[in-house]
Structures are given as C-alpha cells and as structure tokens.
Image (spheres, grey):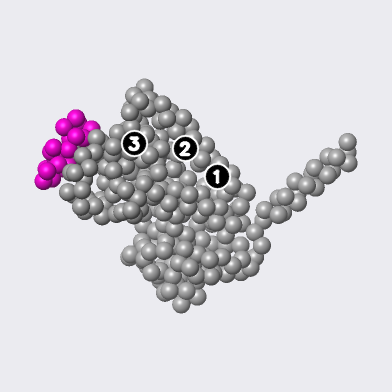
Amino acid sequence: MKGILTLITLSGALSGAAAATSYPLTITDDLGRKVTLKAEPKRIVSVLPSTSETVCALGLCDRLVGVDDYSDYPQQVTKLPKVGGLYNPNIEAMVALKPDVVLVSQYGKLAEPLTQAGVTVIAVNPETYDEVFSKTLLLGKILNREAQAKTLVGKIKGDIARVEILTKNAVRKPTAYFEIDPTPYSIGPNSFMGVLLTKAGARNIIPASMGDFPKVDPEFIVKANPQLILGVDAKTAGARPGWSGISALKTGKVRDIPAELNTMLGRPGPRLGQALMGLAKLIHPELFR
C-alpha cells in the first residue's frame, strides 16, 4: 500500500512539474510575431481590461505593475499606475515600470515603439468565442500558470452551461439587433458577443458574412425588423428615421443595457458567464422569476 501511495504522490509531482512552463519560451502572438520570453514574467503591464481581469483570475494580480486607463476589475487594479490606452498610450510610463512583459491588443500599434525601447511585448486579443478560452490558456502558458488557466476555462464554461440549461427552455427566441455603438456598430454571430447573444436565447439579425463587429446600414436594421433591440434606449431608437415601425419599438421590446453588464459583455474574459446571465435575464426575464 505504501508503495502505491508513493507512486501516486510521485505521479502527482511529475504531472505538476510537467505543467510548469519552460523558459526561454517562444510563442507566435496575435500580430504574427515570434516573441521569446527569457524567464517567467514577474512584472506585468496589461493594456487591455479583459487581459487585466484574466491575469488576476490566474492569481497574478500582485504581478501587475501597470494597467490601461479602462482596467477597473477587480478592485485591486484600480490602485495601479495607469499607462493610457491602446490609442493614447503612455510609452514612457510603461518603460519606466520596467516590465518583464507588456500584454497588448493587435490594435493600437504599441508593439513597435515598446520593442524599440527594449520591452518584451505580446499581443493577445480574443475576438471569437473559442478564442476566449484558447487565449486564456495561452496566457496561462506565458505566465507559468497553465493548471490555473485550465481550471479557469472550466469554470467559465460551467457558468455558461448553467445559463444555457435555462435558455434552451425558452418557448420563443426573438430576432434581435444588438448595438455596441450608435454609429451604428453591431455584433456578428461568430464574435464572442454574438455567441453570447445566441446562448442567451435570441436570434441575431446580423449575418456572419458581415463580420464580427460590423458597421451596419440603418436601413438594413429597418428591413430586418427585429423583435428585440438591445444596447440603445427606446427614445433614441424611436427618433431614428424609419425605426418607429420596427417590431421591437411597437411592442416595447427595446432594452438599454446597464453600465456594469455592458462592461462585462464587452470583455472577452473571466466574467463571460456572469455577462451571459445578465443578458439572458434581459431577453428572457420569464425564465428567472
């Protein structure tokens, strides 16, 4: 018996060791660049709110030394030095923090100036639903927290599955238009937000051919005649040319999204399950009474 216990203990130790990241580590980031990390990052700057949340969810909030202007969750990150945003970055502030790595988006053109300043930069930018999970696992590898990343992915998927069990029972699934910007911009069905909309029990009027976050012709929305409009208030929607005849306005199914939920829905990170729950309650309040 003792020998078996020893083998089990040894097996556990070996599997734990196998989960550790080996450095130097070379990965291909979302800009298509090959980036090498010489050692486990101990000082991290995050320039994306969703990335800041993921780093903290991996148990590494204490390694964040700077974040973008919009990172506000968890509370701990609000006390960190701010380094601007993707489009108004403070490069000097980032360099002054002496980071081992700066985690950026594929947008904003931060990689070149930071790399020229001698800083290691990795672009990690989930946009599709599946990428939320694959990029979480990638961050786990980069930061030597692979086991924690797998656990986190399992938790997010579990949170989402619990909501889906309810929404699958919805008698009717309304056609929906989800506005993320009054220009107007919307969400395609293959974006992470589009997948959430479907899982919340609605049918997206935006076809996949338009892309993940398309700018939409208002006339297209009028012709699509959605039964539900999300992300804009009824007064604003009703004032737009031709919109007063849309089914959603006629039946009072126009829902502005509360600020906190809107923030969660826009971040492809650890709170995706909570975001889905909030969205499902807006679309199918009858399932949550």
Q: Position of residue 221 (x, y in %)?
A: 21, 45
**Amino acid at circle 1:** Leu
Residue at 24%, 52% in the rendered image:
216
Q: CA distance from mark 3 to mark 2?
A: 15 Å
User: Closest to the observer: 45 or 37?
Assistant: 37
Residue at 13%, 38% in the rendered image:
244
* Residue designated by label 1: 152
Image: magenta residue range: 236-253
Q: Is residue 27 above or below residue 20?
A: below
Dot 1 or dot 2: first in sequence order is 1
Q: Is residue 232 left or right of residue 159?
A: left
* Residue designated by label 2: 160
Based on the picture, tell me whether residue 242 belongs to the magenta stretch.
Answer: yes
Tell which tag, 3 or 2, sits nearer the viewer.
Answer: 3
Quadrant holding the C terminus = top left
Furthest residue to the top?
A: 289
Tag 3 and tag 1, C-beta contact below 8 Å: no
Q: Position of residue 35 (x, y in %)?
A: 54, 69
Q: Is residue 119 left or right of residue 109?
A: right
**Amino acid at circle 2:** Ile
Element marked by disc 3? loop
User: Closest to the observer: 174 or 120?
Assistant: 174
Q: To which quarter of the image does residue 282 belong?
A: top left
Residue at 40%, 30% in the rendered image:
167
